[in-house]
Image (cartoon, coloured by chain):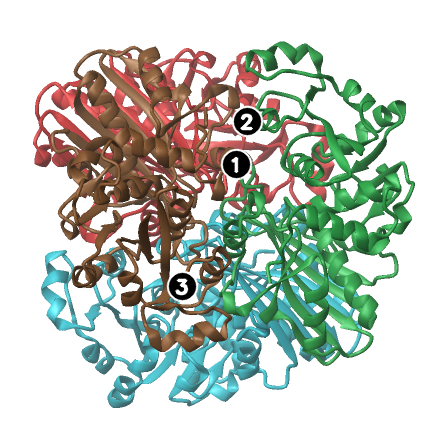
Chain colours: A cyan, B red, C green, D brown
């Protein structure tokens, strides 16, 4: 059993913890919080030992009815590997802690590639991660792009990718962030950072990305256009998507035309937290025009990297060397039934 | 086993179906849809027989991979009681169908009181419902108001209620409805219909309500102010709320200040569909000033009436004559652990 | 003086009326409303004679203090040309009225090309409109696309256009329309209707468009990518934009990154109704990569077609045969000072 | 001519500057910015001398084409009075500057009462401001409350006020602030700070206020309920509102039911920046039930304090000692035609 600590029990951290707990070959040895909040009560209800960064706050936690197991340093001692899910930019500062404790560490895409020197995606470079001490799971958007680009590249060769990311403003419970009534270019300049980030995983891909932020809380929407090296038929492309363990085809018959309806469907199907771990590709949008491929895909910002973190744990610890087997095991443990 | 049909498998209907299926003394004999949609696939995955209003659409359903069990008339024949969860105003037109089929029927709050001649709330008038053929479960807002008003009336006597309802614009997956960037008075005149609707259950209560709509999808927020007949202490009021089976105290320690964080908490606690069946009363807001009581309560528009429908089924069929026992049974079957 | 009637005094109609009134060579002979509303009071305050479709409502208007000048038929008798700004789909039904009255008529982009058999854009085909009885000014999105595509086509030749339209959900005062918290693919299939609509004006252009709707009320945002026939330098492209009478460069120095800040700027500059009649092209986004051009442009859905309607009136009536002179006259009368 | 400086040329500052410039007895001697932005270009276009807090940024301004007149200290030397419209909390830190420069100063409601020791409202305490060195114009919400409460108190006596403020999340161009899809209690506890803030102007008023924030950018909505000492008739109350120079009755005939439609009306009427300087009271909502008064009023957060600042300048400088005359002069200069 791999002993996993989660440093930062927030939007991503709480999902990674539950995903770890669901796996047969790993367990949660602790999660950390910086202050008492509703999520600390959730950790308690799940039975995850609660560690805190600043022990001087121990009394505040305990007054709220939240037992404290120790400091983050204590948590690291109990772990083989730590998943750092602290807010973007904070993770980098934690690296010396992890080095000192001698634990393996995984950061999220809010950190730069350089924090780990290696950027991970289950489909693209699982085998390269085997045995590494440090890795970074790329962001939700980059993960979604890597999956579809890599799949098409293997099948047809990809000459060029142009992608537009229409991003959510904040997560559902993030009440501080806007915008309320604006489309924000983020950034105004072209390309956005997503293209180079894809190249941290797939260095040979020629890609230009543009990004904007809109007032929604649920899911990003990607417009993906690729110039393929070989012409593809729509049927073959759909076939590849159907077989892919981390792609879900949003069928025309279901009448789903939006992120909101897609989230409702995931909720109705009983997914924990209505999570969409896979790329939500709109079947009807998949279009092959000459050597060009066009499609819309929804990317659930809170969820798609969760399963990647699990695979990354297996690769880094070397417990499973075959990416297909890890992906299958992760999916099975989470009762991942495709939205198909 | 009471045989329950759900006519209208949408936002409320799908929740009532799952709640019925969770009870030990009733079962779902069928649900109805007017067209294939993602919810029809959900019904199929749950194993609920799918009936359709217009049999000429049978081929369209079956082409989409959705077997059709028969017409709505067929469904009614298989049922002891039907829960009508069709869109507001449609339910009224179904009454002749139910009369003809000789089934008991429950309508939702989108219909007028007159559709059934009796308006139901588990806390307030369960015993009056025993043996009735027709009943109407009052709307989400009215249900939330009835619970808190009745509890305070029994304890202290209520001289006057003033309530402001800040309502959600549309349900999460309802992509057609706005507003996008406006506060809409709905209605402009005072009082709104909610006051008279409360009086359809609690005729002796003196109440003035005002309502507006804002661009959110999750939960209504009520400002409730009551002039009590006897002064109350804050501690006693909180005590009543803690003991009430359909009230949840949103604790200050959890740091929740909004509908969005409250929904996240319900989601994290594993509630199906993140549903909040109880009034979400913000502990810190509960204030006693002289003989006045003030508080904020969040009302989950998709959920709070679901448990009331279950109790109403038990009352109308006479299978359980004690409201407290029905409420406890309903809550237990849904693994209702208070947000406390 | 050309006598202009505006049939439908709403979002577009009220702007066209004010634009007509500002021109030296035309005047407003009447505007029409179907019911008393705040806009009818605005028409009254502007001194525009108010006509109504259904004379049986005359009493209701007059009771509200709104004198009625006559029926829509009466209005048409007083006009040389009518601008039909009724809701999409209604305009088509008015065609027999205009034929019978023998007036020239302009429809908006909410109608199909076939309603007039000729689709207009000031830049692209002004001369073809000279003397026509019927024309259709293309929609706000198509107008914005035609301007930029035509300008680049004349300078460099356009091989292919790929454009993504991120559209507003409803106009600012349209409180019924959503979505509230969703990205809606509209349509899910590719291409959207915008590509063919551009071809109704520029038939030789090879274009693929995709469109989605987001919860904002102010402006659409276009991602425009073109494969040019000849490589262009960024400086030259910016130079063309600077000189174009209907393009505005949103300068990097102004720090504007969103539709909301751009609208605030138009407001602060004293533009009537904060209107942006030009394409709002984000200077910093304009990128030339090989033979490819990328840019973001904001399109104010309520405004950009207003100036096109004025030019179309001049072309159809033949009062001015030179497009450049009409465009300059329109702009000057509106005190159009570029956002530059 | 009173020489007025505006420290902080943002949402409020730019409106105060234009309002000052429109008055016959005062003029703008300078405005300040901390960084080049679109508003600095607006100041330049208006001909307002531009001062900057940090002279080391002078080169950055001038590179952007924005001439710098000097430092904030220089600006203060040229002024008789400064209107501090810096962000909430910053204004307090500027007090020593104003003391040292020996200028009179007005702060906004984002600062505490203590910053000036005197809180101002034109209707309530104009005469007390005469000759003062420092004053604070209360916030938009408090201004709106003071107007209506004072008017009713003078006419009928006010026993008790209960008010609910449904507040906008951010100003239209404030793209950072949320919420996107939440109702946020701000604060959760009761009362909010607005009640005590009203008492800083009207100390004898018994008032309880509650506040929440919703995802809109335009206007707050107040639910105001008052227990009057003497019963009032609806007609008399409406009559008082009609005559009040800073109240606007939103007439039922205009069909306006929301903040968005009201803003559209102000825009259509040609108000600069669509500003609503008056309380927008919904005629149809005004209800007298026994000795109780209920109403909805819209408060334009960017605008209603602007006219109060102008009056406050006249009072403090002593140039006009009669509040009614100042209010009339302010309104007339701004071509204030009531929304009536």
- The residue at the point 28 percent across, 12 percent down is B203
Mark with earlier residue (3, 1): 3
> Disc 1 sits on a residue from what chain?
D
Tell me the CA gap for discs 3 and 1: 32 Å
Whether residue C267 is visible: yes
The correct choice, above or below, for D338 with respect to A164 in the image is: above
Residue at mark 3: D50
Mark 3 or 2, closer to the camera: 3
Is disc 1 in contact with disc 2, using a CB cutoff of under 8 Å? yes
Residue at mark 1: D264
Whether residue B242 is visible: no
Q: Quadrant of the C terminus of chain A?
A: bottom right
Residue A77 place in picture, x, y as percent: 22, 82
> Disc 2 sits on a residue from what chain?
C
In the foreground, D294 or A80: D294
Q: Is residue B173 left or right of residue C138?
A: left
The correct choice, above or below, for B262 with respect to B106 in the image is: below
- The residue at the point 28 percent across, 24 percent down is B146
Q: Are marks 3 and 1 on the same chain?
A: yes
- The residue at the point 45 percent across, 41 percent down is B215
Q: Is residue A232 left or right of residue A137?
A: right
């Amino acid at each position: 059993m791999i002993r996993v600590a989660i440093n930062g029990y927030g939007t991503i951290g709480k999902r990674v913890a539950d995903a770890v707990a669901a796996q047969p070959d790993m367990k949660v040895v602790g999660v950390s919080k910086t202050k008492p909040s509703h999520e600390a009560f959730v950790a308690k209800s799940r039975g995850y030992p609660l560690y805190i960064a600043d022990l001087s706050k121990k009394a505040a936690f305990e007054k709220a009815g939240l037992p404290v197991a120790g400091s983050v340093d204590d948590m690291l001692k109990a772990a083989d590997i730590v998943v750092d899910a602290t807010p973007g930019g904070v993770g980098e500062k934690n690296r010396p802690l992890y080095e000192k404790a001698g634990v393996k560490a995984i950061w999220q895409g809010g950190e730069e590639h350089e924090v780990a020197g290696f950027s991970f995606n289950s489909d693209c470079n699982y085998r390269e991660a085997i045995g590494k001490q440090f890795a970074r799971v790329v962001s939700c958007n980059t993960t979604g792009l890597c999956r579809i680009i890599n799949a098409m590249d293997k099948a047809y060769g990809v000459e060029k990718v142009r992608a537009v990311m229409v991003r959510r403003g904040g997560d559902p419970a993030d009440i501080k962030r806007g915008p309320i009534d604006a489309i924000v270019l983020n950034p105004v300049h072209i390309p956005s950072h997503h293209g180079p980030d894809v190249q941290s995983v797939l260095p040979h891909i020629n890609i230009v990305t543009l990004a904007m932020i809109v007032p929604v809380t649920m899911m990003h929407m990607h417009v993906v256009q690729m110039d393929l090296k070989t012409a593809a038929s729509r049927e073959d492309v759909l076939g590849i998507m159907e077989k892919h363990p981390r792609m879900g085809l949003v069928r025309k018959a279901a009448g789903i035309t939006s992120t909101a309806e897609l989230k409702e469907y995931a909720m109705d199907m009983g997914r924990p937290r209505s999570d969409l771990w896979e790329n939500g590709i709109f079947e009807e949008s998949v279009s092959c025009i000459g050597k060009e491929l066009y499609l819309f895909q929804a990317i659930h910002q809170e969820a798609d990297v969760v399963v990647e973190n699990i695979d990354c744990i297996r690769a880094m610890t070397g417990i499973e060397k075959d990416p297909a087997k890890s992906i299958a095991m992760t999916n099975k443990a989470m009762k991942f039934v495709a939205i198909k």
